[in-house]
Image: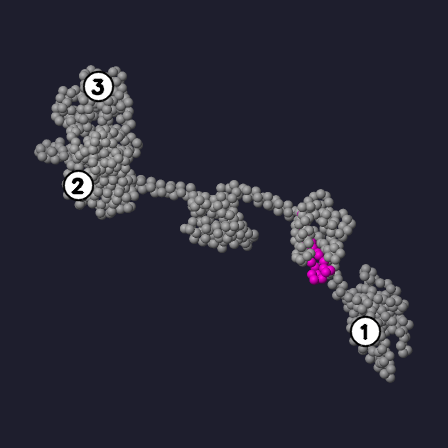
Amino acid sequence: MLSLFSMGLTSFVQRLKFLFSSRSAMDENRDEGQLWLTKALDLLPKPFFLVNYEQKRITFTNVAARRMLGVDYSTQDIADIYPKKLSIFDTHGNLVPREDLPTARVIRGEVVDGEEFLLVTSTGRYNIRIFSGKIPPMYGRAAGGIIFFQDITALKETEANLLRTQSDLNEAVENAMVGFWSVDKRSMKATISEQIEKQLGLLPNEFNGAMESVVSRIHPEDVERVSEALQKSMETGSLYHIEYRVIHRDGTIRWIEAKSGITGDKNIDDHRFAGTTIDITDRMEARRRLEASEQELRLLADFMPQIVWSAHPSGEFDYFNKVWFDYSGSDLNSNKGDRWIQFVHPEDVPQTIMLWTRALETNEPYENEFRLRHHSGEYRWFVARARPIFKDETKREVKKWYGTNTDIHDQKILTEKLEEARISADRANSAKSQFLANMSHEIRTPLGAIIGFSELIKENGLGRKEREEFISVIERNSSQLLRIIDDILDLSKVEAGLMLIENIAFSFPEMLTDFSSLMGYKAQAKGIQFNSKVISPLPLSIVSDPTRLRQILMNVVGNAIKFTDKGFVELRVKFEDNFLEFEIEDSGRGISEEQAKVLFQPFTQADASTTRKYGGTGLGLVLTRSLAEALEGTFELKCSELGRGSTFVVRVKAQASVGLGFETTPSRSVTSSGQFAGLRVLIVEDSPDNQALISIYLSRAGAIVDIASDGAQGCEMATSADYEIVLMDVQMPVMDGITAVQLLRKGGYEKPIIALTAHAMKEERTRCLAAGFSEFLTKPLTREELMNMIQSFLK
C-alpha cells in the first residue's frame, strides 16, 4: 500500500507541476491563476500541506486538512502549530518533540514515507500516516514540499478488533485445549500447535516438521487404523474423524480425537490438510466407566425375575433383558417398532395399544395388565409398568422410557380362585342358612304333630277310631322326622369318612321286587305310572350293602315320583361287568342348565321353592352320590329338559355270588310272635322310654326281660343270672357301657353283648367292638332290626 501511495504522490506532484506551468502560460493575471489553483487543490480528498523551504512556513492547507486539524494553518510558521494548536504522538504513545515533527524534518530535506502517528486536534483524535514529497522551483516560485496525511483511524480500529479477536480466539483455543495441525501436500511438511505438543508430550523443538515424530507417539495397535483413515481422507477429500490412543512421554496412555479436512481448492495440487485434535482421555474414561456401569446394570437386569426394557421417546423399544428372550424365544430385531405387540394376547391388544399411546402422548407413567405368549405357545398374565425419564423436568421433554413386565399369572389365578372361593363360600353360607331354615321347618313340623297328637291321645273319651288315627299321625310324622335326621347324619358320616358300608350276600331280585311294589303304591297314590324293567339277566344273589343300595334307590326313585305330577316314572335295571346300573327316567318338571350346576352341592336345592312345596332336606341327591361312590360307583344326571323330565343313572359295584336268573326264594324277616319264647334277655338302658319300648318288642316275641338302669347295675345282674343276650346302652350314668363291657370281658363273661347307641358313626362301631361288644345297633331301633340281630346270635 505504501508503494502505491508513493506512486500516487509522484503523480500528484507531476500534475501539480503541469498545472503551475500551463496556467502561468495562459493567464496574464497571476493572482487569478493562484486563485484557480487553490480551488483546484481544495477539491482533492486527501488532507495535505504545502510548505516553503526558504520561509519555513506552511503556504497552503487544503479543505480536507483543515477539517482534520480544525484550523487553517496556511501562512503560519511551522513552529506556531506545535504544541499550541495540536499534539502528535508516536506509535508508543510518546509526544513527538518539536524538532522531530514531520514538517520540521521535511524542511530539513528529509523524506517522511508512511510513518504512523497519533494526531490530537480540536476536532478529535486521528491515527495518520504521513508521506512527504518535493516540489522544484517553477516560474519564480521557491522550492517547497508537500506533506500528505492519510487518515487510518478506521483501519487501526479494525486492526485492534482483529487483534482482540485473535487474542480471544487464542485464549479460547488454549482453554479448550484444542490442538491445530496442517500438512502441505507437496512437501508433506507438517505444522502443529503447542497444544498438540502437550498432548503428545513432545519436548520443545522435538518436532521437526516430519509426520513421523507424531506417528511415533500413536499406540502400536492404532497406527494402521489411523494411517488408513488419513490416507483415504487425502486421496478422496473426505472428512477425517477418528479416535485413537497415544503414548505420552510420561508413559501414560491418552485418547485423542482428531478431525480434519482438505483446505483450499481440492482440484489444485498444492492444497493442504488441516485439522484439530482434542485430548478425550477423561471422556473415554467416563465412557468406559459408564459402559462398565451399564454392563453391570444389564447383568443385574438379566438376573431379575421381571422382563426389563427401555424405549425411545417415540415408543420404539431398544432394549430387553435376557428374561424376555428366554420367555418369548425371539431376538431383539423382531421386537423393534411395534413388533412386540405380536406377543400380546389378541384380546388384550386394543387396551394395551390404547394405554401405551396415551402414556406417550401425556408423558405420564404407564401401567397395564395383559397376557404374553410364551415360546411354548402358553399365555401368561403380566403387569407392565413404565415411567419416562425427562431431559428437563420443567419442559417435560422425554429422554427415554424404562419399564418392567412382572409375571402375575399365578397371583392372578390365585386371586380369581380366591374370589371364586369367596363367592362359592358366600353361596354355600347362604345355602346353609337356607338349609338350616328349611331344617328348622322340616324338623319342627313333624315334632309339632307328634307332640300335639301325643297330648290328644292322653285325653279321656277318645274313641278307638280317633285314637288309631292319632297314632297313625304320630307314626307318620315320627318316620318323617327319622328320615330327616338320618339324611343329616348320613351326610355327616360321609363327609367325615365314617360311613359304615357292609358287604354281605343278599337276594337282589327279592329286594328289587319289594322296592318296586312299594314305589308302585306311592306312584299310584299320586296318580302316575311306575314301571320297573329288567333289561339284562340279574344275579340271584349279590355281595353289597343292601341298606345303602335301597337307600340310593329310595332317594332317586322317590325324588322322581315326588317331582312328577303327571305321566310316568320308569326304573330300568341291568347287570354288566360286576356293576348294577339303574336308569331312572321321569316325565316331571325337569332341571335347567343353571340348576344342574348346583344339583349335587350340599345344602343346595335346584329350586328353593321345592322345600316349601314338597318338603325334604335338599340332601337327597348329594347323599345319593356319596353313597354310590362309597359303593365304588357313580351317580350322574344323564339328561334333563325343563318341563319335559329328567333321566338319572346310578352305577354301583355288586359282585354276583349266585348265577344269573330271575327267581329266588324270599328271605323273610323273623318277626313272628313267640319266636323268642323262654329267651332271657338283660336290657341295660338308662332311658325309661327305651326300656319300655325294647321290653314290649321282646316280651311280645316271648322273651323274658330284665332291666338295669346303669353299667354298674348291669355288670352285677349279668354275672348273677343266666342271660342268653345282653343289650347295653353305651352312654349311661354311674358307669358307661364301654367300661361295663370291659369289666365283664375281663371277668370272663362270654355271652353276646350288643351295643345300643345313638352315635351312628363308623368310629363308634369300631370303638364298641374293640371294647368287647359282640355287635352294634344304632338308635332309634326298629323292631325288625332288633329281632334279626338277636336271631343271628341264636343261630
- Label 2, label 1: how far apart the Cα atoms are: 152 Å
User: In the displayed image of the protein, which residue is found farthest to the bottom?
Assistant: 28
Please, is residue 33 above or below residue 572 in the view? Answer: below
The residue sitting at 78% across, 67% down in the picture is 151
Q: Quadrant of residue 678?
A: top left
On the picture, is 287 further left or further right than 109? left
Q: Quadrant of residue 588?
A: top left
Q: Which residue is mark 1?
A: 62
The numbered dot on residue 751 is 3
SS of the residue at dot 1? loop
Magenta stretch: residue 258 in it?
yes
- Label 2, label 3: how far apart the Cα atoms are: 48 Å
- The type of residue carrying mark 1 is Asn
Quadrant of the snapshot with the N terminus: bottom right
Q: Nearer the viewer, residue 111 or 571?
A: 571
SS of the residue at dot 2? strand
How many marks the image carries: the answer is 3
- The type of residue carrying mark 3 is Lys
On the picture, is 167 further left or further right than 61? left
The numbered dot on residue 530 is 2
From which residue to which does the magenta span run? 255-276
Nearer to us: label 2 or label 1: 2
